[in-house]
Image (cartoon, coloured by chain):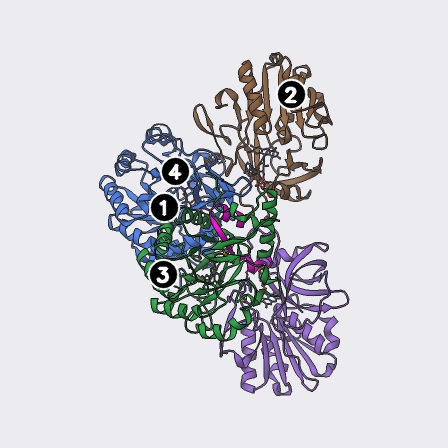
Chain colours: A green, B blue, C purple, D brown
Amino acid sequence: MVNLGIKIHELDFKNPVLTASGTCGFGEEIADFIDLSLLGGIVVKGTTLKHREGNAYPRMAETPSGMLNAVGLQNKGVDNFITNIYPRIKDLNTNIIVNVNGSTIEDYVALTERLNELDKIPAIELNISCPNVKEGGMAFGISCPSAEAVVRAVRKVYSKTLIVKLSPNVTNIADIAKAVEGQGADSVSLINTLLAMAVNAETRKPVLSTITGGLSGPAIKPIALRMVWQVYNAVKIPVIGMGGIMNATDAIEFMIAGASAVQVGTALFIDPTIPVQIIDGISAYMERHKMQSVNELIGSLQC
Amino acid sequence: MVNLGIKIHELDFKNPVLTASGTCGFGEEIADFIDLSLLGGIVVKGTTLKHREGNAYPRMAETPSGMLNAVGLQNKGVDNFITNIYPRIKDLNTNIIVNVNGSTIEDYVALTERLNELDKIPAIELNISCPNVKEGGMAFGISCPSAEAVVRAVRKVYSKTLIVKLSPNVTNIADIAKAVEGQGADSVSLINTLLAMAVNAETRKPVLSTITGGLSGPAIKPIALRMVWQVYNAVKIPVIGMGGIMNATDAIEFMIAGASAVQVGTALFIDPTIPVQIIDGISAYMERHKMQSVNELIGSLQC
Amino acid sequence: MKKTVTDFLLLENKQLNKDNFRLVLQSPQPVSDLFPGQFINVEIKEASEIFLRRPFSILDVNYNQHTISLLVKILGRGSKKLTETIAGQTINAIFPLGKSFTLPDKSDRILLIGGGSGVAPMLFLAKICGLDPANVTVLIGARSVSDHIDVSAYQQFGQFFFATEDGSLGEKGYVTNHSVFSGELNQFSKIYTCGPDLMMKAIGRKAIEKNIFCEVSLENMMACGFGVCLCCVEDTKTGHKCVCTDGPVFNVNDLKW
Amino acid sequence: MKKTVTDFLLLENKQLNKDNFRLVLQSPQPVSDLFPGQFINVEIKEASEIFLRRPFSILDVNYNQHTISLLVKILGRGSKKLTETIAGQTINAIFPLGKSFTLPDKSDRILLIGGGSGVAPMLFLAKICGLDPANVTVLIGARSVSDHIDVSAYQQFGQFFFATEDGSLGEKGYVTNHSVFSGELNQFSKIYTCGPDLMMKAIGRKAIEKNIFCEVSLENMMACGFGVCLCCVEDTKTGHKCVCTDGPVFNVNDLKW
Ligand SMILES: Cc1cc2nc3c(=O)[nH]c(=O)nc-3n(C[C@H](O)[C@H](O)[C@H](O)COP(=O)(O)OP(=O)(O)OC[C@H]3O[C@@H](n4cnc5c(N)ncnc54)[C@H](O)[C@@H]3O)c2cc1C
Ligand SMILES: Cc1cc2nc3c(=O)[nH]c(=O)nc-3n(C[C@H](O)[C@H](O)[C@H](O)COP(=O)(O)OP(=O)(O)OC[C@H]3O[C@@H](n4cnc5c(N)ncnc54)[C@H](O)[C@@H]3O)c2cc1C
Ligand SMILES: Cc1cc2nc3c(=O)[nH]c(=O)nc-3n(C[C@H](O)[C@H](O)[C@H](O)COP(=O)(O)O)c2cc1C
Ligand SMILES: Cc1cc2nc3c(=O)[nH]c(=O)nc-3n(C[C@H](O)[C@H](O)[C@H](O)COP(=O)(O)O)c2cc1C
Ligand code: FES
Ligand code: FES
């Protein structure tokens, strides 16, 4: 039997496969398809302090090997999460991580304080990288000083595992990773979507209501892999990799490049059973390669 | 009859479809497939002052809807270009543009001076964005001051049409575009490839000899479109768009987003007749949409 | 029925006219509790430019044979590719998805209006409601008789009327010009419709005006189909609702029409 | 012959053994001047994960029927998909590509060594050279008789020998262990080879050592196949050369082996 367990800061994961924020709802939506307790973790939909309606329709465009989205953090706010959703999902027997969003540092702090109270939320993912709304924090995630400021403020009020989600829309992602590590982040996750655009040639209008949106899916995998590798070489904290992971081989590539864990996002739209297939595929790979622990994979790239 | 002619600075193009540097050799290599004089222009392989062997093999990886390359500006140097190649291609009856690369400002200037002598080279494309080698100038292309410095120096010695090719590996490409416009660039072309990576999960080695390489092809089209649109809105000089253009619809989307002309790159590997198909496709589109001049398309996005 | 990712066996692929095909898919497991308005999200295999699944309404069900059928109209690359699937091949789909129409009471007099590929859920609804045929009126619109789909198998379930833009079948004009619709609409206690947006809006507004219960089935662009991506939203009076899970069926009174 | 992008008609697709197929492609135009070592770059249609073309050597030509044939071994997704093409479908390819082997003189005694799918250009070369059969010796290696390809149609062109790793056909062992190769190699004035890298290197080094003319056909990864991408380079004594245009055939003396 291979050992799939990994650790991010002080948090144990039964395996390195998580579902990505904004692509699995609160977990419940995919419970028909898979046994959620098999997952390493679930990062729930981006949450804000207040209820948000999100952006206007249309919010989606299909692109070569990928898609654009401009959801804009539609969610019912943290109160609704705590009152209505948390009680339903808290005993799912997997790590439930909340994706935290704000437009000001005060928002981030206030939201984090609320989540800090919740026993069964062992970690938050601080999203400073959503390209689709001002409140998504991408403005924070694209410069070192602002990334540092928000992480510093949140770190003060949050004692559990703090994961910071990085934006790929930057010149040097390793610098941002080092900056947030310096402020006490326990882990970084990457990448969020790449700012992109689709045009309808016939109507000469943007396809998305917001003109630009975030690109995800296999198209971005080579960029995500590169960034994970750069960040892995720049920081000491564990890296959580994502971007276009569709199968076990993709996940293994991310781990070889330095990811301690991976998140599966857009792939869920194609097939919500993929995370479980990936877990099985990693096991099979490890057996074939005579590995005992999945830690042997992490950062095993031979250059 | 629709009018496909466009102007970049003072240079007339019979149509807005060019072939991209590094993907069409010196034009001759695709002359079996198409009548080169039908093209708006040909941007020849990246040229350096001295002969370069380029990077070690393997230099290529196939990725979802795209590919990575790490050619590393293999070329025989500008003397060889002037002596052996220029005489053969100078009368092709299309705009021959030379893609100029250096690792120091002096290199760029020396190379540009040599090209300035050539009557039938009406424009150069200053590459400050090749991600694959130090000499590719990406270091210049990712910060405003260094981009300004190289453009300023080259502008002093070059009187013909100066196109600056921008890197997408930056936080804010519009800022870089404005910076080079400020130093007298006559046009900007974008995007060069995105820095990316491929890993072989079985061998746990990078696929490319250089570990990272440049991502091109349809996968990057949504990112390229977004950048063209951002740059178009930021500068007054004409924008030349590229990145994943595979057919006329793609080319039209770039023009709607603000491109005065487009370059076809990786698509040539799949089918070297694509540029001619695109020219025909743009004509057909214009007829269908009752447009007289292709200028009506440029920046016609209705937001 | 629980949602699953299922490999269906394509039993039959029948071209009905130039652009429309009926596909009969057999599930390896029994199917249960499928209702008109629900849909399935189909993987388009081996297609170089298609990344996402494509949603199609359930046209009919045969519980004994574990089959469901679809009416697929060729619109773009994905639907075209799907209609090229050959009987005997497998088709992977996520199903069942979405909420169905509110089934009428025995006492209702219902009007079903379908346009284009929107006839699929209307025929399924007619069949489910058609135990008492007198009460089911079905109005079907098409551009021309050549685009029209043979509905004879369903005519036992209600009274059928047709409208074509060129007058080649039934009355000439849109469904909203048809005498059934422009006549005494209040004879109907419930109106159900699925079809082009403009058609549904015209019908919905009239129903609101006349204060008749009316449900419409929307076809917003979808990425997932099961409520996780939040891409398919319709801006309703109570905010953004997911067409794939809160719909695709909505009461017109809830929409901002 | 000028390079073109051609829609070939697949006339025949014959499975030769578990992993190997022979495809016969007909060009709408006459074909001319095709030589052993040249290759074509084939589009893999409707395959969701394939972006680039795939190169395959020319196995044979029939100028009267405008056909060329390929020997395709299933290695990954692209070759698999290609072998699933059905006679009557079209296959798009760029051809002819690359430089051929240097054809021998009548006075030469030549040895052709093919391994795996590398037998394709060897068989074509045997045929072209085979007017004087006594001078053509062909040595073919395979893992086992079940991987071996029937070459009876080519045996009239030379003397054939076989080596299999399990001894199930011909001598047991690699081609380089075969008595023809380990014997009096200087009886041959020219050696040509195509196959796995390690095999070609072993042969090439021996030829260098014995000072025998030797050409090998390389299979580097290609993006374009016609000399524009510069991805397929081999590091030769005179610098990086494109396998697709300067090769795929190289004289071993030019390589850094
Ligand atoms: C709930 C629902 C039920 C439907 N039922 C049927 C049905 O029974 N029969 C039928 O023929 N069609 C039905 N459709 C429409 C069908 O999904 C589209 O025709 C199909 O997705 C088009 O795919 P394509 O690749 O052929 O077109 P594309 O080439 O992708 O695009 C053509 C047009 O199709 C529409 N479209 C594309 N993708 C989607 C998508 N994921 N969701 C919605 N619209 C899209 C867009 O307006 C686009 O402009 C239904 C749609 C929905 C949302
Ligand atoms: C000049 C030349 C002639 C060839 N002749 C033949 C032949 O006659 N018969 C035959 O069966 N095969 C031949 N090959 C090899 C054939 O091109 C590969 O087997 C095929 O491209 C694999 O594609 P795939 O999608 O099945 O494999 P993939 O799943 O893409 O990869 C499997 C392996 O195939 C190799 N490969 C993949 N793509 C390429 C590429 N574009 N160029 C080179 N190698 C690649 C790689 O080593 C890779 O690890 C030739 C290759 C070259 C360069
Ligand atoms: C529809 C959609 C909604 C998303 N919402 C969020 C979000 O709320 N918070 C967040 O941090 N990332 C969000 N993301 C980004 C993903 O979590 C992930 O970082 C990105 O999609 C790349 O991974 P993928 O290619 O596997 O999807 C969203 C992505 C998609 C496609
Ligand atoms: C194999 C290869 C070689 C390239 N060489 C150069 C080069 O020498 N100079 C340059 O400016 N861009 C070079 N590029 C980048 C292309 O010109 C183009 O900017 C990029 O590929 C995006 O366009 P595409 O997706 O249409 O290929 C190269 C691209 C490829 C794929
Ligand atoms: S399509 Fe994803 S939520 Fe409706
Ligand atoms: S494959 Fe492009 S140069 Fe050889």
Q: Nearer the viewer, residue A171 or D44?
A: A171
Cα distance in 3D space between marks 1 and 2: 63 Å
Measure the C-alpha gap from mark 1 to mark 4: 16 Å
Quadrant location of the N terminus of chain D in the rendered image: top right
Counting every numbered tag in the picture gives 4
Q: Secondary structure under badge 2? A: helix
Q: What amino acid does circle 4 point to?
A: Val
Q: Are marks 3 and 4 on the same chain?
A: no
For mark 1, what is the residue?
A: B13
> Residue B44: which numbered mark, if any?
4
Q: Taking B145 as reference, is C74 left or right?
A: right
Q: Which stretch did the figure color magenta?
A: A251-274
- Cα distance, mark 3 to mark 2? 66 Å
**Protein chain holding label 2:** D
**Foreground mark, 1 or 3?**
3
Q: Which residue is mark 2?
A: D177
Residue A30 lies in quadrant: bottom right
Q: Nearer the viewer, mark 1 or mark 2?
A: 2
Q: Is residue B205 magenta?
A: no
Residue B97 image offset from top left, x and y in percent: 35, 40
